[in-house]
Image (spheres, rainbow, N blue to C red):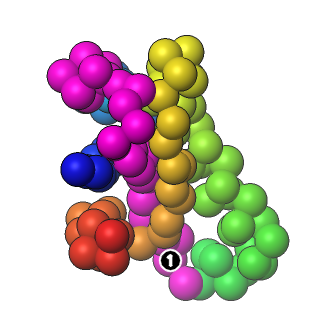
């Protein structure tokens, strides 16, 4: 039986503790488990995004999400746990639920 885990992270110590708990609780790495680590960044107001331009806004979202994922990614990499890093923009709760429903 294969199962999936979705871990949302905002870069906080609480998110890193949640990742640590998952690794220990589910004895990860485990080939039966697929782990998705997701960060959802709030969208910039449309006027701000328009003034900055698509390239700058895209780089901003990418940098912010990578920074939020970094602590969890580092811990998972050190323990040899495979995962999918997912970066999205929008309302966090809605985008996380949307991702979970698509899986």
**Res 14 seen here:** no
Over which residues does the magenta segment extend?
20-46
Say left or right for 32 vs 76. Answer: left
Q: Position of residue 31 (x, y in %)?
A: 41, 37
Q: Say which of 77 and 63 sits in front.
A: 77
**Res 7 seen here:** yes
Give the residue at the far left of this rendering.
Answer: 25
Q: Residue at x 33, y 77 (%)?
A: 102
Q: Which residue is mark 1?
A: 45
Say left or right for 58 vs 101. Answer: right
Q: Quadrant of the C terminus?
A: bottom left
Q: Residue at x 41, y 72 (%)?
A: 90
Q: Position of residue 60 (x, y in %)?
A: 68, 57
Q: Say which of 2 and 14 sits in front.
A: 2
From the viewer's perspective, is residue 47 above or below residue 89? below
Q: Position of residue 20 (x, y in %)?
A: 31, 20
* Number of marks: 1
From the viewer's perspective, is residue 66 above or below residue 70? below
Answer whether residue 30 is magenta in the image: yes
Answer whether residue 86 is magenta in the image: no
Q: Secondary structure at mark 1?
A: loop
Say left or right for 84 vs 27. Answer: right
Give the residue at the far front of this rendering.
Answer: 1
Q: Residue at x 19, y 22 (%)?
A: 25
Q: Badge 1, how many Cα within 10 Å: few under 14, some, many 20+?
A: few
Q: Say which of 52 and 85 sits in front.
A: 85
From the viewer's perspective, is residue 91 above or below residue 62? below
Q: Residue at x 33, y 42 (%)?
A: 32
């Amino acid at each position: 039986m294969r199962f999936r885990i979705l871990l949302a992270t905002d870069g906080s110590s609480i998110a890193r503790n949640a990742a640590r708990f998952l690794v220990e609780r589910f004895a990860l790495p485990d080939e039966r488990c697929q782990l998705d680590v997701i960060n959802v960044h709030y969208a910039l107001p449309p006027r701000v995004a328009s003034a900055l331009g698509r390239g700058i806004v895209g780089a901003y979202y990418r940098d912010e999400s990578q920074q939020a994922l970094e602590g969890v990614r580092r811990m998972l990499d050190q323990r040899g746990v495979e995962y999918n890093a997912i970066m999205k923009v929008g309302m966090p709760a809605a985008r996380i639920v949307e991702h979970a429903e698509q899986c």
